[in-house]
Amino acid sequence: MNVAAPAPLSFRQVLAIDVMRRVWYAQVISLLGDFLALFAVISAVSFRLHGTPAQVTGVQIAYMLPLAVLGPVAGVFVDRWALKPTLVGSDLIRAGLVLLLMISTTLWQVYAILVAVSSVSSFFAPAQSVTIRQHVPREGLLSANSLMQMAMMGIRIVGPAAAGALVASFGARLCYGLDGLSFVGSAALIGSTTFIAAPRASQAAGPSANSRIHQIWIDMGQGLRFIAHHPSISFVVLAMAAGLFTLGCFGPLIAIFVRESLHAGAGSFGAVSAMIGIGLFAGTQVLRTLGRRMSNEAMVLSGLAGIGAGVLLLGALPFIAATLASTFLIGFAFAGIIVPAQTLLQQETPHELMGRVSSTVMSTVFFAQVLGLVLSGILGQLLGIRAVFFLCAALAAALAASGHFFLAAGHARDTRHQA
């Protein structure tokens, strides 16, 4: 006799969980602060330090590269450390580091501070993912991850206007101060709740530093092997990487596309950029309903196909209406990748491996985004911007098609092993 699966929890039910509610509030506050600070840094590098386009792009790379490099190592420690002190300590350290931007006078000082902030964030992000997995029941994970993405995209929609107004009226230093306060507020919210106990990875007893380093490599390998030997997880990791690679290519080129292909100005650029956030926000709203009828893997496949269609439309029809529609579709489809992918990771990963797996995934997708940022300018110069969009569309379509057969083969192999 088959037992019906529990109905997915609503947003309200998920937010009724005290730890989840406070983590979500903390996410909203710290994301707004981060957006204000990053916008202010780009503004300062562009106008106060007279940075070149490559130096402005370097701001984004400095912020993302440590997340890509340190992720697998950070996950080893997150699986061993207590979650609450890790989250609170990361917030407080980042609050102090962000305030150093107020006294920075050179571009290299700005880069160094951003690298330091991002290095600490490489511990916070997997700890946050483990916290959600630990406190939210399985049937609530899709809604929980949707809420986290809604917070991110909501800030992306309202953030540009707020950041622009604050920087123009009060200067970059106010934004740095607000970001520091946002980290303190996040630490206070997380620190004021009680975490439940959960299994953690055991500390390896070793007589020397060499043995401890060896154990770190062993622990990192466990996370990598789990991903590699789990067909669904390895596929969704690749899908997330492809989606963020596409967005990495798309982001730096869209302003030039609006200027040269649409022959439009800054107002149109703002509207086009906002449509991605609006699309992603809308996509997260419908995922809980789709989750009742579709598997996480099917939603990820559909998301990849949707991104391919959106980028193809973007390159094929250089008109403002089509561009607005295509960027909305890209954002909507990306929700179909990132939210079910994160949910599948949390559902399928054992508690004791969650930090290592989530941080390795974070490392992979941020590396893909950095690669997209670096390659976008090179490919755009060599091939043209619309050609880059067509290449991204072909990549998404190829991954969606190959992913279908890859998952089918993996499920067939699992069925044979169970028989």
Image (cartoon, grey):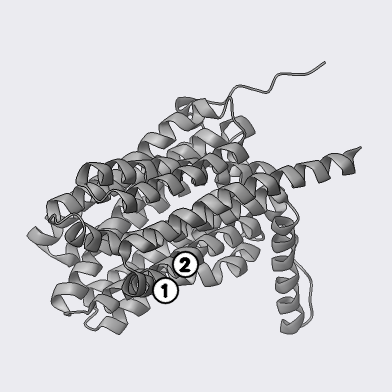
Q: Is residue 347 above or below residue 81?
A: above
* Amino acid tagged 2: Val
Drawn side of residue 87 relative to residue 171, left or right: right
**Crowding near pointer 1: few (<14 within 10 Å), some, many (20+)?**
some
The answer to whether any part of residue 199 appears in the image is: no
Residue at the far top in the pictured view: 1
Q: Are marks 1 and 2 in contact (CB under 8 Å)?
A: yes
The local secondary structure at tag 2 comes to: helix
- Location of the C terminus (image quadrant): top right
Q: Is residue 400 above or below residue 61?
A: above
Q: Nearer the viewer, residue 98 or 384?
A: 384
Residue 40 is situated, as x and y percent measured from the top left of the image, at 21, 64
The residue to which callout 2 is attached is 120
Residue 368 is situated, as x and y percent measured from the top left of the image, at 49, 64
Q: Residue at x 33, y 69 (%)?
A: 380
Drawn side of residue 168 relative to residue 234, left or right: left
Residue 123 is situated, as x and y percent measured from the top left of the image, at 53, 63
Q: Nearer the viewer, residue 310 or 29?
A: 310
Q: Residue at x 13, y 54 (%)?
A: 264
Q: In the rendering, which numbered label is found on residue 116?
A: 1
Q: CA distance from mark 1 to mark 2?
A: 6 Å
Residue at the far left in the pictured view: 169
Residue 41 is situated, as x and y percent measured from the top left of the image, at 24, 69
In the picture, residue 306 is in which quadrant? top left
- Location of the N terminus (image quadrant): top right
The local secondary structure at tag 1 comes to: helix
The answer to whether any part of residue 412 appears in the image is: yes
Drawn side of residue 382 relative to residue 171, left or right: right
Q: In the rendering, which numbered label is found on residue 188?
A: none
* Amino acid tagged 1: Ala
